[in-house]
Structures are given as structure tokens and as C-alpha cells.
Image (cartoon, rainbow, N blue to C red):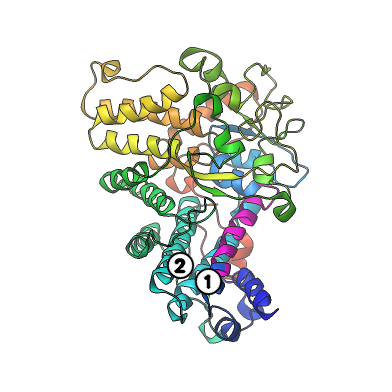
């Protein structure tokens, strides 16, 4: 019973770690006397972080996931009202404010706190084989890096906390660190994980840490920091693993099953344990959708190069007509079908969330190779993805007359479009636009030449400053901690 209580305490440790510490009990007795004493304790502690991720994404009726990863992009149109108090139109029109529920970062710091405890205590566990201990440590560094990597992409400047709080004397109200400092810590954690990981004795479980998941995260970090040499290295290590693309006819299984030969790291979801998967349901509600695929995505699959794309009919209802009032009156059935093709997701469906999969990493590698002036290699990977979808190959001859940066930009544009079609709903588009410097242009065009065209009364904010690309900090967090500052002019 004490061990169960200790795990529960670990899961709750950081709920107020950035705000009001007056209600925080000293945890050193719990942590040192009855927990973090065995390998089983380490496994249980680390497992609680994966559970945190599920809660994190599912909070606010799935609005957290959509606000952070998809809702701000041109992939979707958000509803102006919501029965769950989480209207996505504010997110989708760049009207985020500091009282929007998704601006609360504390749920991420719960996971960071547990990782910090793991990194502190696991080296002290006795009678644990060194190989097993190193793998647990690698996993803890990986999970902390994953948390901070998401936070730095969502908020930019965030507090950096790398030590566990062992007593009230150590409690502090931190300030934010710059994105550069946070990225430096992420790199340190990734390097530590790479140095510690050992294939021998490491679980091959799809739902938790693996070498390939670590390489995927390192590759994404490298692309965010424009370190294309490192991105090429780690995407190459992923491709050397056992993963393979599913067939075009089975494309949707990478989401609807998420346990295919293509999936690298999936967040496991069980209805009896986790309830309804709101993160997925928000873009899959057939009768009352809160997010609908934008008309541009639909039209791309209805004509032109993508008309015969095998992915199209597995992703959405290509036959559904969007009227001129589709932005103000969402058409029923305008849902993403990748988790349940042709039907939409029922509340009790046990549909998982794919974090990393081979198709996405192949396209990420294509981007890196293109930046490294290896267009033929980049187009080969792009073609592999297109062939799976039943599309024609891309050749260097298709870019005749282009050279230098113009060629790189043109190929990158095609890769990004392929990522948009391949990965819609999987949480990559918004960050793709930011890291390639295209977010302002793409989103302002989306506002002015799409949303405004179908709703003349719509209110949106054009992207003019870099700070607008990041989320504001929850106002309550700033009230509770005077050392925090609002990033930008929210």
C-alpha cells in the first residue's frame, strides 16, 4: 500500500511546482524510504510519465492536444462555440489569450518532475544490474527531453527545472529560461540517453522508450535547430531499424491500429483505463465536429496530383460537399477518418496516438538531405512515400531551371506538402511551418484568402511577430509566481 501511495504522490508532485508551494508536502521521506528502491520502482515511476502524457493530451476535452499540435495550423477550421468550454476558433484564428485552458503548462511539469526524481534516484538503487540501470536512466533523460522539446516549441521561453524537490527548503519560484538555454538542456539529455542506452535487455514494447524513439526525437530536435547533419545521422539510424511502410491500402492502420510495422512509438490508450480519447474524438466527431479539415486539404484530394491518392479516402470523406457556409455551419461527417475509416470514432474506441512512425521520419530525412544539397536522395525518399500512396515519382527533372536556394526551396515545398497530406491529425503541421520559417506567410494567406472568403465577419489576428508563433502563459500561473513573465504582448 505504501508503494502505491508513493507512485500516486510522484504523479502529483508537480501540479503546483511553478506556482504556490505552500501546499506542497516534503517528499524526501516518501522518495527515499519507500520508493525508488528497486528496479520495479523505477519502472513504475517511468510508466507514470506515459500515463501523464495521455492525461496531458486529453485535458480540456482534447483541446490541449489540438491547440498545441494541430489547431493553430491551416489543416483545420475550429468551431466558434463548444459544449466543453474549449472553442477551437480562438486557437485557429490566432486569438489565443492567457486565460485559454491550453496555455497551462503545469501538466508538462508533472512529467518533468517525475523524470527529475528518476534521474536523481535511479543511480542509487542497489542490486540493479548496471545495464538495466543505464537503460532506465536513458529512458528518464529521453522523457525529460521530450517534455522540454514540446514545451519549447509551444511556449518558447519556459522555466528550466532539472532537480527534484526533496524538501521545502529547496522550493523556489523559477523564472523562464530562453529557448536557446532550453534547447541546450534538451541536447544534453539526448546525448546522455544516447550514451547510456543498451540494446541488451531493453524492452521492445511499442508503447514506451526504444532506441528508435530516441533517434526520432533527436532527429526532430536537430531539424528544429537546423542541424541537418545530425538530423541525417539519426534519421538514418531509424531507417536502419526493423520498421517498414504499410501498404497504401492499409495506410490508415498506422492510426487505427498504431501497432503496425511502421509505428515506432505509440501512446497506448485503453477506454477502461483512460476513458474517451478526447484528443482524437475532437477531430473525429461525425455529428458535431469541433474541428473540420480545411477546404484546401479536401480539394487537394479531390483533384489534381492527389486525386487518386490511396490515402485520401482513408483520411476523410472525399465526396462530402463543403458549402459556402461550411465555416459557420460545419457539415456533418466532416471528420478525420484515419482512426476509423468511413465511420468516425465512437467514444469507447480504443484508438491510440502515434507519436513517431516511419513514413514521417522518411519525409523528415528527405528535408534534411535536401538542405544538405542532396536532392536526388531527398526525392528518392519523397517518391517512396508517394509510391505507397499510388502517386507518381518525383524526379530532379521536375525542377528544371531551378538551382541553388531556389531548388532547395521548391523541393522543400513539395516535401512539406507531402507531410501535410500524409500526417494530418498526427501533430506535426504547425511545428513544420514554424521550423521552416513559413508559418506567418501560410497562416496569413489562410486567414485572408480562405477564412475571410467564406466568413466576412470573422475576426483573426495576422501573424506579424515571432512571439505570436508561441502560446501565451496561463494568467493564473503568472499571478501565482511573480517571477514569470508573459512572452510577447498577450
> 240 left or right of 276?
left
- Tell me where residue 374 appears, x and y as whole percent: 23, 32
Up/down of 170 relative to 11, above or below:
below
Q: Which residue is mark 2?
A: 136
- Tell me where residue 219 appears, x and y as whole percent: 36, 48
Q: Quadrant of residue 34?
A: bottom right
Magenta: main secondary structure equals helix
Between 488 and 272, the residue placed more toward the observer is: 272
Q: Which residue is mark 1?
A: 42
Q: Is residue 447 magenta?
A: no
> 133 left or right of 103?
left
Up/down of 94 relative to 127, above or below:
above
Q: Secondary structure at mark 1?
A: helix
Residue located at (57% from left, 31% from top): 252
| Label 1 packing within 10 angstroms: few (<14), some (14-19), many (20+) | many
- Looking at marks 2 and 1 on the same chain, the residue that comes earlier in the sequence is marked by 1
Measure the C-alpha gap from mark 2 to mark 1. 7 Å
Observer able to see residue 54 = yes
Q: Quadrant of residue 211?
A: bottom left
Residue located at (44% from left, 18% from top): 391
Residue located at (61% from left, 67% from top): 479
Find the magenta span and give its range: 44-62
Say whether marks 2 and 1 touch (CB < 8 Å).
yes
- Tell me where residue 46 appears, x and y as whole percent: 54, 65
Residue 238 numbered mark, or none: none
The mark total stands at 2
Q: Secondary structure at mark 2?
A: helix
- Tell me where residue 293 appears, x and y as whole percent: 61, 29
Q: Quadrant of residue 281?
A: top right
Residue located at (38% from left, 29% from top): 415
| Label 2 packing within 10 angstroms: few (<14), some (14-19), many (20+) | many
Amino acid at each position: 500500500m505504501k508503494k502505491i501511495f508513493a507512485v500516486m504522490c510522484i504523479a502529483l508532485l508537480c501540479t503546483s511546482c511553478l506556482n504556490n508551494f505552500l501546499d506542497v508536502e516534503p517528499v524526501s521521506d516518501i522518495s527515499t524510504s519507500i520508493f525508488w528502491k528497486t528496479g520495479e520502482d523505477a519502472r513504475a515511476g517511468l510508466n507514470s510519465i506515459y500515463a501523464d502524457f495521455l492525461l496531458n493530451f486529453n485535458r480540456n476535452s482534447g483541446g490541449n492536444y489540438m491547440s498545441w499540435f494541430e489547431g493553430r495550423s491551416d489543416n483545420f477550421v475550429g468551431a466558434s462555440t463548444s459544449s466543453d468550454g474549449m472553442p477551437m476558433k480562438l486557437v485557429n484564428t490566432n486569438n489565443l489569450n492567457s486565460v485559454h485552458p491550453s496555455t497551462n503548462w503545469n501538466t508538462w511539469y508533472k512529467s518533468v518532475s517525475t523524470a527529475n526524481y528518476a534521474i536523481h534516484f535511479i543511480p542509487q538503487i542497489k542490486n540493479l544490474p548496471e545495464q538495466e540501470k543505464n537503460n532506465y536512466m536513458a529512458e528518464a533523460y529521453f522523457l525529460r527531453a521530450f517534455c522540454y522539446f514540446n514545451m519549447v516549441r509551444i511556449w518558447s521561453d519556459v522555466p528550466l527545472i532539472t532537480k527534484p524537490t526533496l524538501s521545502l527548503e529547496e522550493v523556489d519560484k523559477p523564472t523562464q529560461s530562453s529557448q536557446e538555454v532550453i534547447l541546450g538542456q534538451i541536447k544534453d539529455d539526448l546525448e546522455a540517453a544516447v550514451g547510456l542506452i543498451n540494446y541488451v535487455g531493453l524492452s521492445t514494447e511499442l508503447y514506451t522508450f526504444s532506441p528508435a524513439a530516441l533517434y526520432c526525437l533527436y532527429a526532430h530536435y536537430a531539424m528544429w535547430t537546423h542541424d541537418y547533419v545530425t538530423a541525417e545521422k539519426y534519421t538514418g539510424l531509424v531507417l536502419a531499424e526493423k520498421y517498414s511502410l504499410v501498404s497504401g491500402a492499409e495506410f490508415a492502420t498506422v492510426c487505427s491500429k498504431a501497432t503496425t510495422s511502421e509505428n515506432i512509438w505509440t501512446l497506448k490508450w485503453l477506454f477502461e483505463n483512460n476513458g474517451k480519447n478526447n484528443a482524437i474524438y475532437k477531430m473525429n466527431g461525425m455529428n458535431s465536429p469541433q474541428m473540420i479539415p480545411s477546404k484546401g486539404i479536401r480539394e487537394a484530394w479531390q483533384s489534381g496530383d492527389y486525386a487518386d491518392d490511396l490515402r485520401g479516402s482513408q483520411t476523410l470523406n472525399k465526396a462530402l460537399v463543403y458549402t459556402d457556409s461550411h465555416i459557420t455551419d460545419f457539415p456533418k461527417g466532416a471528420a478525420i477518418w484515419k482512426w476509423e475509416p468511413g465511420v468516425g470514432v465512437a467514444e469507447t474506441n480504443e484508438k491510440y496516438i502515434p507519436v513517431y512512425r516511419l513514413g514521417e521520419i522518411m519525409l523528415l530525412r528527405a528535408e534534411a538531405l535536401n538542405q544538405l544539397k542532396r536532392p536526388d536522395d531527398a526525392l528518392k525518399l519523397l517518391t517512396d512515400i508517394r509510391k505507397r500512396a499510388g502517386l507518381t515519382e518525383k524526379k530532379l527533372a521536375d525542377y528544371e531551371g531551378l538551382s541553388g536556394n531556389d531548388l532547395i526551396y521548391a523541393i522543400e515545398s513539395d516535401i512539406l506538402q507531402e507531410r501535410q497530406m500524409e500526417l494530418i491529425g498526427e501533430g506535426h503541421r504547425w511545428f513544420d511551418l514554424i521550423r521552416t520559417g513559413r508559418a506567418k506567410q501560410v497562416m496569413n494567406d489562410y486567414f485572408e484568402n480562405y477564412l475571410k472568403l467564406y466568413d466576412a465577419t470573422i475576426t483573426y489576428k495576422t501573424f506579424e511577430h515571432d512571439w505570436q508563433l508561441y502560446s501565451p502563459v496561463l494568467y493564473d500561473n503568472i499571478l501565482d509566481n511573480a517571477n514569470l513573465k508573459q512572452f510577447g504582448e498577450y
